[in-house]
Image (cartoon, rainbow, N blue to C red):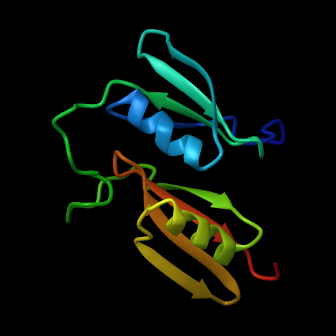
Amino acid sequence: MKEITRINHVGLRVRNLHVTRSFYEQLGFVFLVGPVGPEPVAIMVHPSGVNINFILNADVNSAENVLMDIAKKYTGYTHIALEVSDAKIVANKIEQLGIVITEQVEYEGAQFFFIRDPDDNVIEFHQPAGF
């Protein structure tokens, strides 16, 4: 459909708003509102326009990401990819924050690396080839 213009937001189920908010603020996201609504949801936005809705109803006793950390491969969204202009600079900043980079890849000129948020949601930082 040509009427679709962009992704409006990504929804991530999380256990603790305070912990999640602090983590994403380190990445430059700004808290907008929350918790609101019946789920409830909190919303953060990055100056680049990336909007994340944190769904605040995750099982506090759950410690695994069922889409990424178990042998059975369930369907679903596995990660969010944030495009960056310089992967090496961003990776250095991530490491300075004390956040573990779980994998780094260079493929056909593209560079990307992965981290996990406090709920083990996967975040990719992606520099396309040619940057």
Q: How many marks?
A: 0
Give coordinates of residue 23: x percent, y percent: 48, 44
**Quadrant in the picture for residue 82:** bottom right
Task: Give me the residue at 64% from left, 80% from top.
Answer: 111
Residue found at the far left of this picture = 61
Vertical placement of 10 versus 102: above or below? above
Quarter that holds the N terminus: top right
Give coordinates of residue 121: x percent, y percent: 40, 50
Q: Is residue 90 left or right of residue 41?
A: right
Asked whether 115 or 55 is in front, the reply is 115
**Quadrant in the picture for residue 19:** top left
Quarter that holds the C terminus: bottom right
Give coordinates of residue 67: x percent, y percent: 32, 54
Asked whether 35 or 96 is in front, the reply is 96
Give coordinates of residue 99: x percent, y percent: 44, 61
Q: Is residue 41 left or right of residue 108?
A: left
Task: Give me the residue at 36% from left, 47% from top.
Answer: 118
Task: Give me the residue at 49% from left, 10% from top.
Answer: 37
Asked whether 39 or 15 is in front, the reply is 15
Task: Give me the residue at 21% from left, 32% from top.
Answer: 60
Residue found at the far front of this picture = 96
**Quadrant in the picture for residue 68:** bottom left
Q: Is residue 2 left or right of residue 99?
A: right
